[in-house]
Amino acid sequence: MSDKQVRMLMVLTSLLWSGAFITGKFSVQEFPPFALTFFRFLFALPFIFTILYLKEPKNLFPHGKQWRALLLLGFVGTFCYHVLFFTSLKYTTAINSSLIGAINPMVTTLLAAMFFGERLTPLRVFGIFLSFSGVFLFITNGDLQVMYHFQVNHGDFLMLIGVFCFATYALLSRRYMKQYQLTPFMVTAYTFLICVVISVPFVLCENPATYLSATTSRGWLSILYMSVFASVLGYLFQAIAIQRIGAPRTAVFINLVPIFTIIQSVTILGESITLIKLMCAGIVIIGVYLATRPESKVYPMKIHKKAV
């Protein structure tokens, strides 16, 4: 698979993830955070394990040290991130959560440069900055008053922790896939399974009897969408991209999620869109391209060390 195909795959992934924000608005009204996380990945298990069995029957069962890697990835990247994300929605605004989520590429790139020895080129730094700036202007609609009134609350901190969890998951998954001969299909399937198992005691503490009887078909269909499209396909495509182009370049595509979310809000929910938002969408797309393009013709930033 070429880099161009991988980038197109991540654009599709961003579209699928953006749909989860709309369906999440429906489901979060009917399900508490742990239950929402549990059912989302429970419904995903038959689909992802069927894909794993058909594509890689020899990798159906992990062995040895592979389990340790999968347990950590499943706990940090699937369980912790989604519980933090769903819980944060109770306390923070959509603007705050979108802005905090948009720093994921910068967090991933920073952690990769600090702990994983990833190359950091001036062009990639500029692309990340440009895409984040586009997201910021897109969400605020160029209104400085929005930035002035930006307030930090309990939900913001939860979302920020979630961003670090997701960035850590993205970086560790690539290392573990190489170190333990794990495939994207194995990582996706077993991190989902681990998330479901870990969620069970927390779901029981939420007392399902108090909310299951009041759930609607819209709530269940919303979870089904997040299970199949945002989880199975989204996480699988992301794992393939991480394996092919690395976590920092893959993470930049997260900046497209708010753009697609607004577009779907216009087409599905009938909300309006302004000219400045269309311009900002173009800025984000250019930034994503610059941050993820092949680096054969650019040079890494060098850190000159003093002689001891």
Image (cartoon, helix red, strand yellow):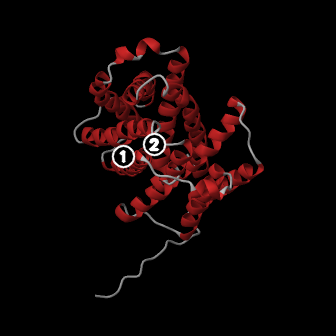
- Tag 2 secondary structure: helix
Q: Position of residue 230 (x, y in %)?
A: 52, 33
Q: Is residue 37 above or below residue 302?
A: above
The image's mark for residue 239 is 2
In this view, the residue in front, 101 or 57, is 101
Residues at marks 1 and 2, CA–CA distance in whole angstroms: 9 Å
Question: Do residues under tags 1 and 2 come within 8 Å of each other at their CB atoms?
Answer: yes
Label 2 sits on what residue type?
Ala
In this view, the residue in front, 55 or 212, is 212
Crowd band around label 2 with a 10 angstrom C-alpha radius: few (<14), some (14–19), many (20+): many
| Left or right of residue 141: residue 201 | left
Farthest-out residue, right: 275
The residue depicted at 40 percent of the width and 24 percent of the height is: 45
Q: Quadrant of residue 197?
A: top left
The residue depicted at 50 percent of the width and 71 percent of the height is: 300
Q: Can the viewer see residue 67 in this picture?
A: yes
Label 1 sits on what residue type?
Met
Q: Position of residue 65 (x, y in %)?
A: 23, 42
Farthest-out residue, bottom: 307
The residue depicted at 55 percent of the width and 37 percent of the height is: 17
- Tag 1 secondary structure: helix
Q: Can the viewer see residue 294 in this picture?
A: no
| Left or right of residue 264: residue 230 | left
In this view, the residue in front, 145 or 112, is 145
Crowd band around label 1 with a 10 angstrom C-alpha radius: few (<14), some (14–19), many (20+): many
Residue holding disc 1: 177
Q: Is residue 131 above or below residue 83?
A: below
N-terminal label among 1 and 2: 1
Q: Position of residue 170 (x, y in %)?
A: 41, 48
